[in-house]
Every structure is written in structure tokens, then in C-alpha cells.
């Protein structure tokens, strides 16, 4: 997926079905110290724990957040 024109790969993630949202698919709706929550279809949420930016090594979300902040509301787009 692309975030602000930069390719990202999700390595370790899980789907949470218990939460409802009205956000556009791909929208970052929450960030914790260990995960990024991304709105998906069918009122599900993708909870990402490891992520990789193009040209970079795979990182935990905690490592990724050291250089990336203010993510809530930004949208991952299809390649």
C-alpha cells in the first residue's frame, strides 16, 4: 500500500472484527505504541505490528513511529 506516495508493506498484522467505524477504507484511525489501526471493509480494522517502507528494513511499529508521527487520518492507497 502507498502512504503519501511511499510504498509500504505490512508484515505482521491481524484483523479486528469487533469494532465499527465509518471511515474510508485505508484510513489510519488509531495509533498505539505497538500498532497502527487501519479501516477496512465490513467494519473490520487491520491492526499492523510490523511495517516496511520502500528501501528500508522491516520495522516494528514502535521503531517506525520514531520517525513517523501524526498518522491518524492519513490514508493508505492501493498500489
Image: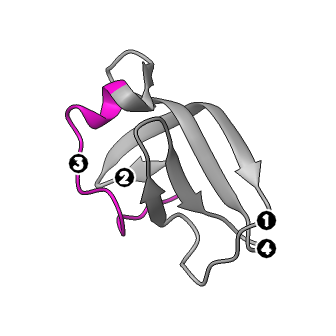
Residue that label 4 marks: 42
Answer with the quarter of the image where residue 13 lies: top right
Residue that label 1 marks: 18
Question: Looking at this view, is 55 or 65 the one in front?
Answer: 65
Marks 4,1: beta carbons within 8 A: no
Residue that label 2 marks: 3
Mark sitting earlier along the chain (2/3): 2
Question: Looking at this view, is 78 or 72 the one in front?
Answer: 72
Residue at image coords 53%, 63%? 26
Where residue 42 appears, x then y in whole percent? 79, 73
In front of the other: label 2 or label 1?
1
Q: CA distance from mark 4 to mark 3?
A: 27 Å
In front of the other: label 2 or label 4?
4
Q: CA distance from mark 2 to mark 1?
A: 25 Å
Disc 1 is placed on an element classified as loop
Q: Which residues are magenta?
A: 63-79
Mark sitting earlier along the chain (4/3): 4
Mark sitting earlier along the chain (2/1): 2
Q: Verify whether residue 65 appears in magenta.
A: yes
In front of the other: label 2 or label 3?
3
Q: CA distance from mark 2 to mark 4?
A: 22 Å
The chief SS type of the magenta part is loop
Mark sitting earlier along the chain (1/3): 1
Residue that label 3 marks: 69
Where residue 65 appears, x then y in whole percent? 30, 36
Amino acid at each position: 500500500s502507498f502512504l503519501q506516495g511511499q510504498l509500504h508493506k505490512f508484515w505482521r498484522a491481524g484483523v479486528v472484527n469487533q469494532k465499527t467505524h465509518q471511515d474510508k477504507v485505508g484510513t489510519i484511525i488509531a495509533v498505539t505504541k505497538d500498532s497502527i489501526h487501519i479501516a477496512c471493509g465490513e467494519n473490520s480494522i487491520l491492526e499492523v505490528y510490523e511495517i516496511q517502507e520502500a528501501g528500508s528494513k522491516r520495522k516494528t511499529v514502535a521503531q517506525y513511529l520514531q520517525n513517523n508521527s501524526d498518522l491518524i487520518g492519513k490514508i493508505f492507497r492501493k498500489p
